[in-house]
Image (cartoon, rainbow, N blue to C red):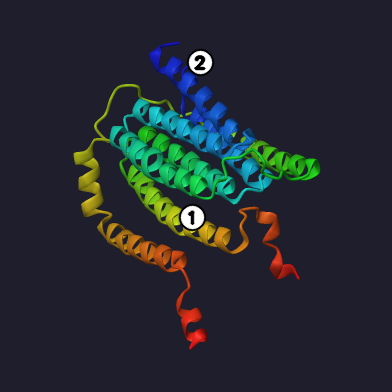
Amino acid sequence: MPVNSTHYLFLSLLLFSIGVMGTLMRRNAIIIFMCIELMLNAVNLLLVTFSKVYADADAQLFVFFIMVVAAAEVAVGLAIIVMMYRKVHSVDINILNRLKH
Amino acid sequence: MDIYDILFWGLSVMAVGCALGIILSRNPVNSVLFLILTFFAISGHYILMNAQFLAIVNIIVYAGAIMVLFLFVIMLMNLNADVEPQKGQLVQLAGVISGGVLFLVVLAAIKSARPEVIDKTSTDIGLISNLGKVLFTKYVLPFEISSVLFLSAMIGAIVIGKKEHVHEVTKAE
C-alpha cells in the first residue's frame, strides 16, 4: 500500500499520544517540558503533510509561527525552572503543591 | 514499495522509537539526546515532503538551539544522575491508560478519513523564495507581532532569572 495522508495522520497522532503519556507519567519538570515540545512537533508534521497534499504554502508558514512560539516558551519556561531550582533545590513537580495547604 | 515508502517507514520507526526513549529513559541527558534524534527523524519527513527549508530550520532551531538550552539547564543543575524519584506504579499506569485512550478516540475519529494521495514528484512550495513571498505579503502582520513576542519573552526571561538583591539591600538599610 503506497504511503498516503492517513499514514502521516497516524504517525503524528502516535507522537502526540506519546507526548501526552510522558507529560502524565514523569515527575521531572524538564522532561515534562520536553514532552510538550514533542507534541508541538507532532502538530508541525501534520501541518507540513497537508501543505504537501493540498500544494499550499500557508501551512508551512504556520509551522514557522509555531516554532517562534515554542522558542519563546522555552526561554521563559526554562527561566522559571531555573528560578524554582534556586528556591527549592529540586525540579520535582510533586513538591510544588503549596497552594493546596 | 518504492524508495519513498521505505524511507517513510524507516523514519517513522526511528521517530516513534526515539519518542518512546524520551519518556522511558531514567537519565534526563539520555532523554534530551533521544528528543534530538526524534527531531532529526521529523526533519527527514519534511525533506520527503518537499519542505526543505523547514527541515533545515527544524534542525537549526530545535536540535541546535532549544535542545542545547535544555542540556545547559540539566548540566547546570547537575541533574544527570539516575536518582530521580518516580511516580507510583498506579499513577504511571493511569498516565499510560489516559494517553492510550486519547490515541484510540482520535484513531476512531480519523479511521474513516478519506486518504489523500501524496504526490511524490518534487514541487517548489517549500523553497525559500516561495515561502518568503507568502510570508512578507500575506502574513506580514503576524510576522511583526511575533517579533514583539520574542522581545517580550527575552525581557521576561531576564526579569525572571535575575537575582533578587534589591530587597535585601533595602532591608539592611
Dot 2: chain letter: A
* Residue B85 visible in the current orientation: yes
Q: Residue B43: percent from the left, percent from the top?
A: 39, 32
Dot 1: chain letter: A
Q: Secondary structure at mark 2?
A: loop
Give a yes or no on whether discs 2 and 1 share a subunit.
yes
* Residue B112 visible in the current orientation: no
Q: On the image, numbered disc 2 is attached to which residue?
A: A1
Position of the N terminus of chain B by quadrant: top left
Task: Identify the amino acid type marked 1.
Answer: Leu
Q: Residue A35: percent from the left, percent from the top?
A: 56, 43
Seen as rendered, the residue at the extreme bottom is: B173
Which residue lies at the image location 30% right of the left edge and 22% below the top edge? B121
Foreground: B135 or B157?
B157
Question: Quick one: label 2 or label 1, which is nearer the N terminus?
Answer: 2
Crowd rating for badge 2 (residues with CA inside 10 Å; few <14, some 14–19, many 20+)? few
Mark number displayed over residue A78: 1
Foreground: B148 or A97?
A97
Q: Is residue A67 above or below residue B40?
A: below
Number of residue marks? 2
Crowd rating for badge 1 (residues with CA inside 10 Å; few <14, some 14–19, many 20+)? many
Q: Residue A32: percent from the left, percent from the top?
A: 59, 47
Q: Secondary structure at mark 1?
A: helix
Q: Is residue B39 above or below residue A67?
A: above
Task: Identify the amino acid type marked 2.
Answer: Met
Q: Is residue A10 left or right of residue A73?
A: right
Which residue lies at the image location 51% right of the left edge and 38% below the top edge? B32
Q: Residue A51: percent from the left, percent from the top?
A: 37, 38
Give the foreground label among 2 and 1.
1
